[in-house]
Image: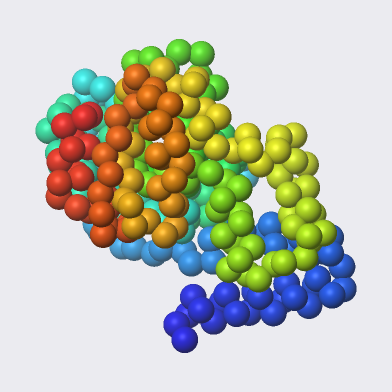
Amino acid sequence: MNVQGIIIKIFRARLQLLTAISKKRAGNEAFRIFCTPYFRMAYKETLFENAERLSFRFGSTNTVGYRWNKGGDKKLLIVHGFRSATVNFLHFIPPLMEKGYEIVTFDAPAHGLSEGKSLNAIEYKNFIGSLNQQFGPFDAFLCHSFGGLAVSMNLAELPENSNIKTVLIAPAANSKQLIEFFFKEMRIKDQLAQEHFYANIHRLSGKNIEWFSIARCAGSIQGPVLWVHDKDDAVTPIQDALEIQQTQPANFHFIFTSALGHRRIYRDKDVVSAIINFL
């Protein structure tokens, strides 16, 4: 069994014990685990030797970021997914610089070299909004997975976004679906424990789980969107992309791939080329 499998097994045992003691404690603990990236991607900053190192204080958390080509014709923010980090997207930097972009990217709170222990969708949305105020305004976003949901939620709240280009790579479009996958992975079958899990979301945001979806945000996003998704993605299934495509939003363009999964997709040369051409 690998390290991830061992950690999941430990979490399952803890949650089963708590469920027997208190459904509320079990639900609260499950929510804490769901928001905690129990694998933190480490990397050497020497990989960023050509970048300007940035630091940004978000609440009580100090976050680490990088900037290339300061003073470029337009600005772009790269937004990574859950349990990921900025280092995974370095291959986009040279072609984006060639297109004249000033590029900014940050390790989200609790990720990479940034401080913090947990991250939820509201926090990530607000973090992106704060970066937009401090280092933007951004003319484009390039985001993956959980970052795609956070960016979409942020865009939906901007009073004017019609000139902003957005690339969604395998976005986490449906939070309820992700949570149901998490319940299955952690073997959380008790209905009351699940209800207490969802109560944390309402307590923090005042919203129900359906609010946390790209389908809700899509109508408020007026700028051009390129959505790239793999048919074999087991982490963020393609179904939501297909459903939104069926509504035929004029500003959304979809590219579907096969056999690339959730992470190899953003390294595929044809996908990278399509993204750069779009931007």
Residue 220 image point, x, y percent: 50, 20
* Residue lying farthest to the left in this orientation: 98
Compared to 266, does 9 lie above or below? Answer: below
- Any part of residue 121 in sight: yes
Residue at position x 40%, y 31% in the image: 246
Residue at position x 50%, y 34% in the image: 214
Compared to 96, does 193 lie above or below? Answer: below
* Residue lying farthest to the right in this orientation: 21
Residue at position x 47%, y 86% in the image: 1
Compared to 127, does 262 lie above or below? Answer: below
Q: Quadrant of residue 258?
A: bottom left
Q: In which quarter of the image is residue 28?
A: bottom right
Residue 208 image point, x, y percent: 70, 38
- Split into 4 quadrants, where in the image is the C terminus? top left
Q: Which of 218 and 263 is in front in this view?
A: 218
Residue at position x 55%, y 53% in the image: 178
On the rendered structure, is 86 left or right of 270? right
Q: Quadrant of residue 205?
A: top right
On the rendered structure, is 127 left or right of 167? right
